[in-house]
Amino acid sequence: MSDTPILFWFRRDLRLGDHEGLSAAAKTGRPVIPVFIHDEVVETHGAAPKWRLGLGVEHFAKTLEDIGSKLVLRRGKALDVLRDLISETGAGAVWWSRAYDPDAIARDKGVKEALKDDGIDAQSFKGHVLFEPWTVETKTGGFYKVYSPMWKSVRGRELAADISAVSELCTPQSWPASDDIADWQMGAAMQRGADIVAKHVAVGEQEASTRLATFIRDRIDDYKQARDQMAERGTSMLSENLTYGEISPRRCWHAGWRAVHEGKSGAETFLKELVWREFAYHLAYHTPRIMDKNWREEWDAFPWKDDERAAEIKAWKQGRTGIQLVDAAMREMYVTGYMHNRGRMIVASYLTKHLMTHWKVGQAWFDDCLIDWDPASNAMGWQWSAGSGPDATPYFRVFNPATQAEKFDEDRTYRARYLGEVFKDHGEEAEDYFKAIPKSWNMAITDDYPEPVVALDEGRQRALDAYKNRDG
């Protein structure tokens, strides 16, 4: 067994640097066969996440070729594919980086148990979190249900230094056959939108490293204030790369702490955002219902609407609600595959409160449209906005898009960037929106901008009345 190949199964860890599992495999001196499987979990991904994952896999394959290795691509149920590869290669081990969302955990548990029964060395290593969920406990030994105490708990924790990038992998005597990723058509559901969104992606480990370095050098000092200004690039933009493991959260953590020690005022806020992401996975692991059910069960009887054929919901998806900031944010997502974090809170509040629509409708739309889609963060974010989740906003806190626009897009630059029907000096992105959307939507930049589907004061009062009735 000591000389047999190791199959290293890549998932959301498409990098060579600071990679615990891959580093351990390389140090054995055994042949390492990198594998990516278009498996039962990948099959469930929405249009934009699946397309962006495909770009990441394709890029990572070239990265491996640069160090003299290869990425073997296969499609099918994970266990079946791995068993086939073991038979073809004589591999004695399958190693991978852990995942922490319920679907991935279920898949991985089944794979590990079956392979061990087959006599295969099946090992998992720390994955895409700073602190594995079972290592963060309250003083009474439970898990955290509120963010602030969790932040205080982990703030002073020591993390090991980053692991040096793998520069060489021992290769097998012969390589198993590999699929052509083009045959998978991972971008098929994007249709004509792929060419538009492609202008805004930053794929791969080197791009992620550049983003981090640029952010730390130029923007982290002002991060606390600038991150809310919707027309500015005040954030790190690393969510895209963290999602696919093109950079490790530990590397971001250490960079953030170096900035703290250098006296950069926004650095601790950046670290808090990394822990907010951790909190999402902490809850996804300990309370998996957060992914598809109300985290607060008392919300199960709340009278949300969920008919996706409803005109109001359709208008929200298309960025045609008549509320400029909401529509601009929705269009940003369709054009870039990304949405400003302030925008995410505003559009989620508007859908769940002004339009009284179930958070799962919004969650599913983001699942389909975001290139930085993260299953745990998306679920927690929507429940936070709706009021049904942990650390949720009180029922009486209904974001007013008009007030938000005055605070965070005072000169209308963000809205002008995306709303071509409203602003003559609109950005290129406004025109790109109409190039990206399905033709079946039958929309054009020459259309009149719509009246609000619901008046802001009316929608707010409707939500408040429903919330008060829920409380009895």
Image (tube, rainbow, N blue to C red):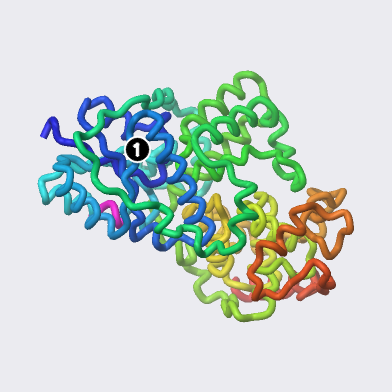
Q: Toward the viewer: 22 or 123?
A: 22
Q: Tell me which residue sits at (19%, 34%) in the image.
A: 173
Q: Quadrant of the C terminus?
A: bottom right
Q: Quadrant of residue 174?
A: top left
Q: Is 244 on the left-hand or right-hand side of 461?
A: left
Q: Main secondary structure of the magenta part?
A: helix
Q: Is 53 on the left-hand or right-hand side of 413?
A: left
Location of residue 381 with respect to 160 vertically, above or below: below
Q: Is 327 on the left-hand or right-hand side of 31?
A: right
Location of residue 126 with respect to 313 vertically, above or below: above
Q: Is residue 397 visible?
A: no
In this view, the residue farthest toward the top is 262
Instruction: Give the structural element (helix, strand or loop) at label 1.
Output: loop
Q: What residue is disc 1 on?
A: 126
Q: Tell me which residue sits at (42%, 23%) in the image.
A: 161
Q: Position of residue 6 (x, y in %)?
A: 22, 37
Q: Is residue 108 magenta?
A: yes
Q: Is 182 on the left-hand or right-hand side of 34?
A: right
Q: Position of residue 244 (x, y in %)?
A: 46, 45
Q: Quadrant of the N terminus?
A: top left
Q: Tell me which residue sits at (61%, 60%) in the image.
A: 193
Circle 1 crowding by C-alpha within 10 Å: few under 14, some 14–19, many from 20: some
Q: Position of residue 58 (x, y in %)?
A: 44, 45
Q: Amino acid at mark 1?
A: Lys
Q: Toward the viewer: 440 or 295?
A: 440
Q: Tell me which residue sits at (46%, 35%) in the image.
A: 248
Please count the marks in the image: 1
Q: Is residue 316 visible?
A: yes
Q: Position of residue 309 (x, y in %)?
A: 61, 80
- What's the magenta region? 106-110
Q: Is residue 174 magenta?
A: no
